[in-house]
Image: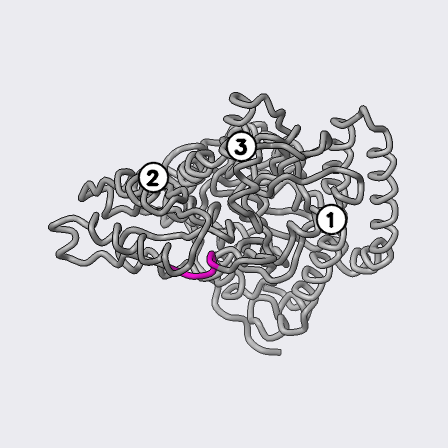
Amino acid sequence: MQPMPPSQPEIGILPVREASIVEAGKGAGIACDKHSAAGSVSQRACVFCGSRVVLYPIADALHLVHGPIGCAAYTWDIRGALSSGPQIHRNSFSTDLQEMDVIYGGEKKLYHALTELIDLYKPNAAFVYSTCIVGIIGDDVAAICKRVAAEKGIPVLPVNSEGFRGTKKDGYRAACEAVYKLVGTAPTEGIPPHSINILGDFNLAGETWIIRDYYQRIGVNVVSCITGDARVEDIRRAHGAKLNLVQCSGSMMHLAKVMERDYGIPVKRVSYFGIEDMSAALYETAKFFADDPTIMERAQALVRDEVALIWPQLRAYRAKLQGKKAAIYVGGAFKAFSLVRALKMLGMETAVVGSQTGGAEDYKQLQEMCDPGTIIVDDSNPLELAKFCLQKDVDLFIGGVKERPIAYKMGIGFCDHNHERKEPLAGFIGMLHFAREVYSSVMSPVWQFAPRRAAKLKGAQP
């Protein structure tokens, strides 16, 4: 037997972070909705990042980053958001501000970049993202956008996304305020009475197409998807829908509330991940359109047929995964709810769960739905996440691109549930994909070569 590596020193927690970490079952509240602690190396992103990941899936719009080239380096296929038509959103455009632009201003550069790109690509709208340096030097981005819009005859929308203005959550709000300028600018003739907008789904790996198909099959028309595979014209007509369904509440609830205020469109929070939540989303929609009972009948038939197709395979995966433990760290807490339920359906225990942007009510719900002893954390950092994964001896880490190295360095299986994935996880078929990925990751024989996991797999004592 290979000798065990020397024991590692205990990983500490910054005192200022202690209030943001609780255990389910102990009834303590959690500190959240505040700026990241200095020195914590938070997993959060900046305001600019929050705005671009929401707006970039609008496929027939131009997206121009006004700032240094570094801010635009991470935009190519940032969310894995697919388009059924235009591909303009897949290009990364930047004004590439230099030292002389910082001194003399970048407005002329922005004007020339916008006019040249609009002439070249013929978009139906353009979004201009302000970055930190733009906020510091004081470029009047709104004035340039207004001038170009008048000259080119398309909406040119400034996004107030200077990175230092707050957190990624503030970027979501900036994105909502920018895209809302399109809503209500086109006629709504021809929109059927049973119609919805899908908000907060970004068509990762084509998930919006799966969801649209479900709604169409039960007799509900989708006016617009904001912003997965979105089109500018559809967004302009979005105020003609009768109901807004919000999946990623952290990113899109602000837009839904404004549309409710101005157009009287009711809002429902839904999730399209997992059998329980996907079924509930369809049933809630059918209940809203209760004037047509056939919608509920079709929804029930769809759920019955889709679950019947995947249930035998899910049972087989559950038999292998029973008792395994997982850690979850995602952007929005609402996504964590669905993951906890899906893991429970697979027979797995959630040992650690946290988010970047959750609110007090979100964490209260997590405490109620998780087993006693589950660690719940807000705005965590790599050291904390590593500590909790080791402490709970988890078999799987579910997160995004920044969490992947944490998992692999500790010899833990990883499941990407964030922007970059290429496998759809929404809908009933998505649950099967998720189960297959979890099984392949947790049960992979590669872990016998990871020193920390090898001892456990071989039955050795630490």
* Tag shown at residue 178: none
Image point 86% across, 33% down: which residue?
Answer: 294
Give the Cα distance between marks 3 and 2. Answer: 18 Å
Region in magenta: 88-92
Mark 1 or 3, which is nearer the eye? 1
Q: Is residue 282 magenta?
A: no
Q: Amino acid at mark 2?
A: Asn
Residues at discs 1 and 3 in contact (Cβ within 8 Å)? no
Residue that mark 1 sits on: 213
Secondary structure at numbered mark 3:
helix
In the rendered view, tell whether residue 28 sits above or below residue 357: above
In percent of width and height, residue 116 lies at 31, 58
Between 103 and 439, the one lying in front of the other is: 103
In percent of width and height, residue 18 lies at 43, 37
Give the Cα distance between marks 1 and 2. Answer: 35 Å
Image point 12% across, 50% down: which residue?
Answer: 104
Between 418 and 365, the one lying in front of the other is: 418
Between 188 and 377, the one lying in front of the other is: 188
Whether residue 37 is visible here, answered yes or no, is no
Between 21 and 172, the one lying in front of the other is: 172
Q: Residues within 10 Å of mark 1 (few under 14, many from 20)?
A: some
Residues at discs 3 and 2 in contact (Cβ within 8 Å)? no
- Residue that sits furthest to the bottom in the current view: 1
Q: Amino acid at mark 1?
A: Asp
Left or right of 425, for residue 400: left
**Mark closer to the chain start, 1 or 3:** 1
Residues at discs 1 and 2 in contact (Cβ within 8 Å)? no
Residue that mark 3 sits on: 253
Helix, strand or loop for the magenta stretch, by majority = helix
Give the quadrant of the N terminus: bottom right
* Tag shown at residue 160: 2
Left or right of 213, for residue 390: left
